[in-house]
């Protein structure tokens, strides 16, 4: 094949294709551009995958840290609970009696002195009653009577007030009792006047209680099922009547 030679002036005069920056197909510039695009795409893919792996790693780390903290807290709570149970399992409760509120009056730690074998039917059962008042005026204990019968309760024929050293049969109604304004009234056997549930209608075992209804001059009243105290709980008291700070559990409003 003959090769046609053109003069330099004719060759320069031929129309030229404007350069687009990407180069013509098949030219070194086009291959270089494709390589750069592929390399850039690969770098973007690799960078996105790395970010996803880093995010997943951070999430797993956070979950493991949270689980570790929860496990440590659970172990600490379990250890403390075990210690408390081991320490208090042989302790007598500080206040084994029952509490109730009647307006500004708070009845606290009501119970029956423990008696081995319980109280036989027809006997008189002493009651331990502690009354606190937040009223601005004295409050009279207007009536104390047997309460309604319930589950595991033994009723009495009446509730009377017994004075220390008084002759048998001289017990009277407890209507003369007054709680001082902002003070207290303690009715505890062996420490002064106290209440007695007379002639219980059935035997009173350790697991049963005596229902008693208290009414006050404020118009408030409440029924309490008075239980028997534990064998090791002492029934003692200080002064019978006087001013006092509010009880540990204040009356509900």
Image: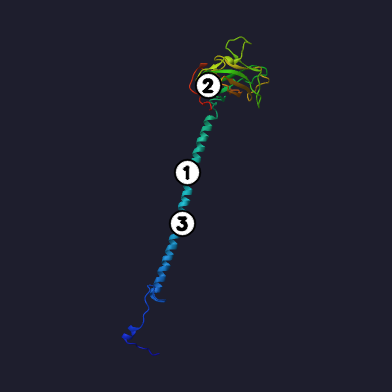
Q: Secondary structure at mark 2?
A: strand
Q: How is the image coloured?
A: rainbow
- Residue located 41% across and 67% down the image: 39
In this rendering, position of residue 202 left or right of residue 174: right
Residue 245 at x, y = what percent? 48, 22
Quadrant of the rendered image containing residue 173: top right
Q: Secondary structure at mark 3?
A: helix
Badge 1 density bin: few <14, some 14–19, many ≥20, Cα 10 Å: few
Q: How many marks do you count on the picture?
A: 3
Question: Which residue is farthest left?
Answer: 9
**Residue indicated by mark 1:** 69
* Residue 61 in the image: above or below residue 108: below
Q: Earlier in the sequence, mark 2 or mark 1?
A: 1
Question: Which residue is farthest top?
Answer: 167
Residue 232 in sight: no
Report the disc number at residue 53.
3
Question: What whole-number distance in Å separates the C-alpha atoms at marks 3 and 2?
Answer: 69 Å
Badge 3 density bin: few <14, some 14–19, many ≥20, Cα 10 Å: few
Report the disc number at residue 220.
none
């Amino acid at each position: 094949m003959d090769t046609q030679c053109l003069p330099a002036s004719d060759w320069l005069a031929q129309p030229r294709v404007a350069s687009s920056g990407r180069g013509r197909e098949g030219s070194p510039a086009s291959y270089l551009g494709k390589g750069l695009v592929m390399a850039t795409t690969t770098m973007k893919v690799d960078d996105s995958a790395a970010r996803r792996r880093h995010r997943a790693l951070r999430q797993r780390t956070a979950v493991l840290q949270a689980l570790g903290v929860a496990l440590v807290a659970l172990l600490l709570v379990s250890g403390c609970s075990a210690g408390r149970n081991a320490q208090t399992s042989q302790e007598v409760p500080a206040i084994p009696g029952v509490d109730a509120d009647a307006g500004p009056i708070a009845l606290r730690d009501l119970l029956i002195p423990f008696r081995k074998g319980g109280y036989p039917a027809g006997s008189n059962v002493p009651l331990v009653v502690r009354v606190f008042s937040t009223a601005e005026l004295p409050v009279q204990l207007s009536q104390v009577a047997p309460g309604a019968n319930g589950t595991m309760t033994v009723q009495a024929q009446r509730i009377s007030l017994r004075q220390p050293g008084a002759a048998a049969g001289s017990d009277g109604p407890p209507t003369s009792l007054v709680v001082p304004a902002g003070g207290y009234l303690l009715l505890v056997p062996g420490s002064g006047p106290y209440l007695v549930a007379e002639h219980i209608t059935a035997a009173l075992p350790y697991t049963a209680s005596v229902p008693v209804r208290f009414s006050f001059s404020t118009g408030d009243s409440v029924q309490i099922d008075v239980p028997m105290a534990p064998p090791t709980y002492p029934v003692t008291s200080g002064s019978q009547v006087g001013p006092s700070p509010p009880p540990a559990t204040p009356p509900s409003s």
